[in-house]
Amino acid sequence: MGVYTIVDGFFIGNSIGDLGLSAVNIAYPIVAVIQALGTG
């Protein structure tokens, strides 16, 4: 998941910019909680 976040941030940062990076940083904790609930 960590490598996915780094690569995703790289591509979104280059194509969309600061607004896209802030959206990823806001959505990441929500995705992590959903993934933790699904795994657990």
Image: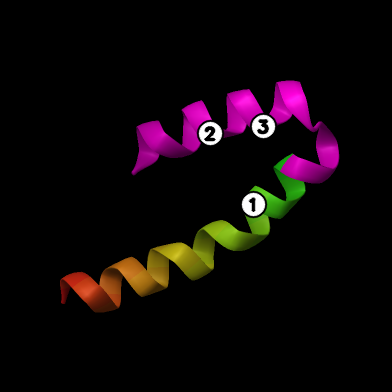
- CB atoms at circles 2 and 3 under 8 Å apart? yes
How far apart are labels 2 and 1 at the CA level?
A: 11 Å
Left or right: where does residue 12 sit relative to residue 28? right
Assign a secondary structure to mark 1: helix
Mark toward the viewer: 2 or 1: 2
Assign a secondary structure to mark 2: helix
Q: Where in the figure is residue 17, as x and y percent of width and height? A: 81, 31
**Which span of residues is magenta-colored?**
1-20
Q: Between disc 2 and disc 1, whose residue precedes?
A: 2
- CB atoms at circles 2 and 1 under 8 Å apart? no
Q: Where in the figure is residue 10, as x and y percent of width and height? A: 60, 24
Identify which residue is drawn at 83% across, 44% down.
19
Left or right: where does residue 8 sit relative to residue 38? right
Assign a secondary structure to mark 3: helix
Q: What is the chief secondary structure element of the magenta stretch?
A: helix
Left or right: where does residue 37 sit relative to residue 7? left
Q: Which residue is mark 3?
A: 12
- CB atoms at circles 3 and 1 under 8 Å apart? no
Identify which residue is drawn at 75% across, 49% down.
22
State the quadrant of the C terminus: bottom left
29 is higher (above) or lower (below) than 6: below
How far apart are labels 2 and 3 at the CA level?
A: 6 Å
Residue 11 has which mark? Answer: none
Q: Within the image, what quadrant is residue 11 found in? A: top right
Identify which residue is drawn at 66% across, 60% down.
26
State the quadrant of the N terminus: top left
Q: Which residue is mark 2?
A: 8
What's under tag 2, amino acid-wise?
A: Asp
Q: Which residue is mark 1?
A: 25
